[in-house]
Amino acid sequence: MTHLLLLSRGLGAVPAFLAATVPHKTPLIGYIPDATRDFTDAPFVRAEREALASLGNPIIEIPLSAHTSESLAAALDEVDAIYVAGGDTFALLDAVRTAGAADLLKQRVEAGLPYIGSSAGSVLAGPDIKPIGPLDDPKGLHAGTDTTGLGLTDAVVLPHADGLLPPYPLVLIQRTLARYADRFRIVPVRDDQALLHGPAGERLIESSPLLDVAELLGATESSGSTEQSGTTERSTESDS
């Protein structure tokens, strides 16, 4: 009964996924933002949240860092699907471990709670986040730590695999594949794709961005502030 939609960046596949997994109602989405811990004011964080909100579903925020296992269980009881946002995969995994949330999240998703991951959230769903190290931890600050993921799939999503975002050039994607492909089942996912996983199997599907990011950010900042240039203009390597 596991239903996963593992995005790289574009949310285009989300409406159909929700319609298929939560029929006959407007799903309430639980938004898990912990991968954005160090980037709360970054344009890419706001852009992703705005894109999700544009779908029209009610959203409640469920920061793992604010919950115990008991309160998280109660929060998950209230939602119809969870959306695990992009950002720093290692920060996200740290939040999962600190909250003692790994087993609970896995149990709920395996019991039928739809799981939507974006970038870091997609990587977390796999067996291990180690292969994302060259993208999210190029200095090796997390070397030696436990990098075990949720294990909802045996696939390790490699997001931004088209190499179009400046922090993740194609040469870095290729280097990551060469380094880890013999140890993990890595699935490269472009920014206009998603990995769909369900009872019928697993396949890559189209998931284009809902809006041009620069246009989206400009619309949210039209009150006279300088328009941002988009999610690619970031000083970190942590949108995974």
Image (tube, rainbow, N blue to C red):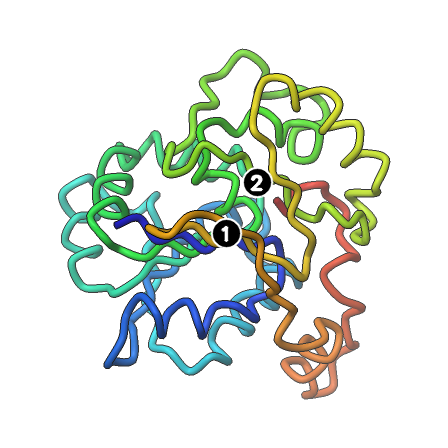
Return the residue nearer the eye: 235 or 26.
26
Extreme front residue here?
Answer: 200
Residue that lies at the very extreme toward the bottom in this rendered image: 223
Q: Tag 1's secondary structure?
A: strand
Percent across and percent down for residue 37 are 50, 46
Circle 2 SS class? strand
Q: Quadrant of residue 216?
A: bottom right
Which residue: 61% across, 53% down?
8
Could you tell me the amino acid type at mark 2?
Val
Mark 2, residue position: 157
Q: Quick one: which residue is furthest to the top in this view?
A: 144
Which of the labelled discs sits on residue 6, or is there none? 1
Query: What is the C-alpha distance between the residues marked 1 and 2?
Result: 8 Å
Q: Are marks 1 and 2 in contact (CB under 8 Å)?
A: yes
Identify which amino acid the numbered label 1 is placed on.
Leu
Q: Is residue 86 left or right of residue 76?
A: right
Q: Nearer the viewer, residue 16 or 211?
A: 16
